[in-house]
Image (spheres, rainbow, N blue to C red):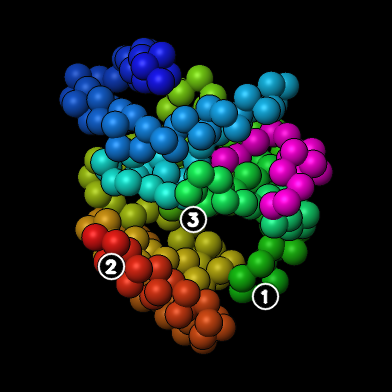
Amino acid sequence: FQDLEGSCQRQVMSFVPPPSWWDFFMKLTLNTNKEVYEEFSHISELFPSYRCYLVGGCVRDSLLSRPSKDIDIATSCSPVLVHSLFPDGTYYPKYGTTSFKKDGFEVTIASLRKETAYLDFRHPSKIEFVSDIKEDYVRRDFTINALYVDSFLNLIDPSRLGLADIKNRLIRMIGNPDFRLKEDPLRMIRAYRFSLELGFILESSLEESILRNLELIHRLKPVKIKEEINKLSNQHKDE
């Protein structure tokens, strides 16, 4: 594992961030979630002809020195091929995801995709699988959840805001907040959950948009709201 850790440190140094960022970038170590990166390394080796990325909460939490038991992997590999490698996993072909438990981790592998036309205030009616994270990241909710680490352990911030928002402890919507909240009002609940869970504040345009669109909460199923509240409760129990 020392080789893996040394590789991460070399890759982080290759970014050559401005001096004011240096201490922040050096927080991206494997000390907190080294098992996550080991599992990711093993899994990505199964896709030698495709790009694989750690993404979402496990990357965010590593930057915040928080432990993570979830491993979210985005890949340019097709959903069918991913599922063929993990045939016992839970497979959702529409969304291109395969989920399974491995060595105590909850692992989800999702093919890169873009989404359009949210007609029911929750789910996209059109999904297209793509090969570029520049198309994948825009479907994600917040900049802090759209940070990717590739199989060479390069840290990638396609929104160019995610790292700054983590440093400034800010919840910022990707894209126009009014549009994104009308796509899926559950993002309002998620914004406040992350704010409470991480001790972050809402970016002003997001907060203003939530207040303008509060009536959209009625479009949500109560069970989905309860799930978000339970996630926060479980987080506090773990702490």
Query: How many numbered callouts?
Result: 3
For marks 2 and 1 on the same chain, the one whose residue lies earlier in the sequence: 1
Q: Nearer the viewer, residue 58 or 154?
A: 58
Q: Give the position of the N terminus as an image quadrant.
A: top left
Label 1: which secondary element: loop
- The residue that appears at 25% across and 25% down in the rendered structure is 26
Q: Give the position of the C terminus as an image quadrant.
A: bottom left
Q: Is residue 162 something one can see in this rendering? A: no
Q: Nearer the viewer, residue 161 or 88?
A: 88
Label 2: which secondary element: helix
Residue position for label 3: 141
Which residues lie in the magenta part?
Answer: 72-89
Instruction: Identify which amino acid the numbered label 3 is placed on.
Output: Asp
- The residue that appears at 45% across and 32% down in the rendered structure is 37
Left or right: 63, with 123 as reference point: left
Label 2–label 1 contact, CB within 8 A: no
Left or right: 212, with 141 as reference point: left
Vertical position of residue 48 compared to residue 81: above or below: above
- The residue that appears at 51% across and 85% down in the rendered structure is 222
Left or right: 140, with 121 as reference point: left
Vertical position of residue 155 compared to residue 229: above or below: above
Spatial CA distance of label 2 from label 1 is: 33 Å
- The residue that appears at 35% across and 68% down in the rendered structure is 234
Label 3: which secondary element: loop
Residue position for label 2: 237
Residue position for label 1: 120
Q: Position of residue 204 (x, y in %)?
A: 29, 60
The residue mark sitting in front, 2 or 1, is 2
For marks 3 and 1 on the same chain, the one whose residue lies earlier in the sequence: 1
Is residue 75 one of those drawn in magenta?
yes
Q: Nearer the viewer, residue 122 or 211?
A: 122
Q: Residues within 10 Å of mark 3 (few under 14, many from 20)?
A: many
